[in-house]
Image (spheres, rainbow, N blue to C red):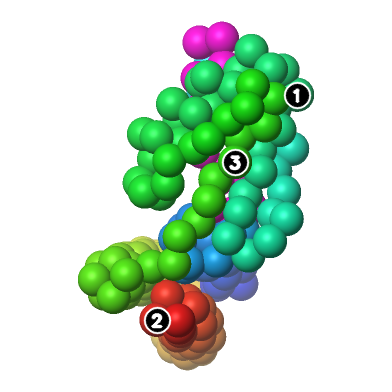
Amino acid sequence: MSVKEILHSTDEKMKKVIEFLGREFSEIRTGRAHPGLVEGLHVDYYGTPTLLKTLASISVPDSHLITIQPWDISAIVEIEKAIQKSNLGITPNNDGKVIRLSVPPLSKERRQELTKVVNKISEEARVSLRTIRRDSKEHLEKLEKDKIVSEDDKFKGLDELQKLVDKYMVKVDEMHKTKDKEVTEF
């Protein structure tokens, strides 16, 4: 493996951390209805865990309502169970064809709890980035130890590695600030 390959692999892994962070943040309720709150829920559909977004049409007619219209009406009970098991804190209502989720405004206490959750998720992303950096650094040092690359190439690789880490840490911080603002706004 070359320095370039290690850096490319590191970049790909760090992109995945950012994608995961985005998915995690999209599932945090901010007092506004959006499809991301329920799209990732797994529903027990005929014994198979299936994503809700593959079982139903999800729409947001206004900022406090999510409607879920299953393509297979028999799945409506399982969809309701999945919503109740989730940590959304929203009780589903159904008329036999459509499930409606009324998203209430968040209380001050719930906003504070969500701020802690956002902080925790962001810190987990930072830890993941640092772990990826550590592993890549070890690879670069092994290349030099095995005399595959020169000491200068190793140091250039380490500099590039740190630039990658800094770039992704800034993205985590930006995403954290944005989500924190969404959670704390009334």
Q: Earlier in the sequence, mark 3 or mark 1?
A: 1
Q: CA distance from mark 3 to mark 1?
A: 15 Å
Query: Amino acid under label 1?
Result: Trp
- Secondary structure at badge 2 equals helix
Q: Please tell me how crowded label 1 is: few (under 14), some (14-19), or many (20+) other residues with Cα within 10 Å.
A: some
Q: Quadrant of the N terminus?
A: bottom right
**What residue occupies the far front of the structure in this picture?**
95
Residue drawn at the location 57% of the way across and 17% of the way down: 45
User: Which tag is nearer the camera, tag 2 or tag 3?
Assistant: 3
Residue 141 badge: none
Q: Which image quarter: residue 186?
A: bottom left
Q: CA distance from mark 1 to mark 2?
A: 36 Å
Q: Earlier in the sequence, mark 2 or mark 3?
A: 3
Q: What segment carries the magenta color?
A: 35-47
- Secondary structure at badge 1 equals loop
| Residue 17 magenta | no
> Does the image show residue 158?
no
Per the image, the residue denoted by label 2 is 184
Per the image, the residue denoted by label 3 is 100
Per the image, the residue denoted by label 1 is 71
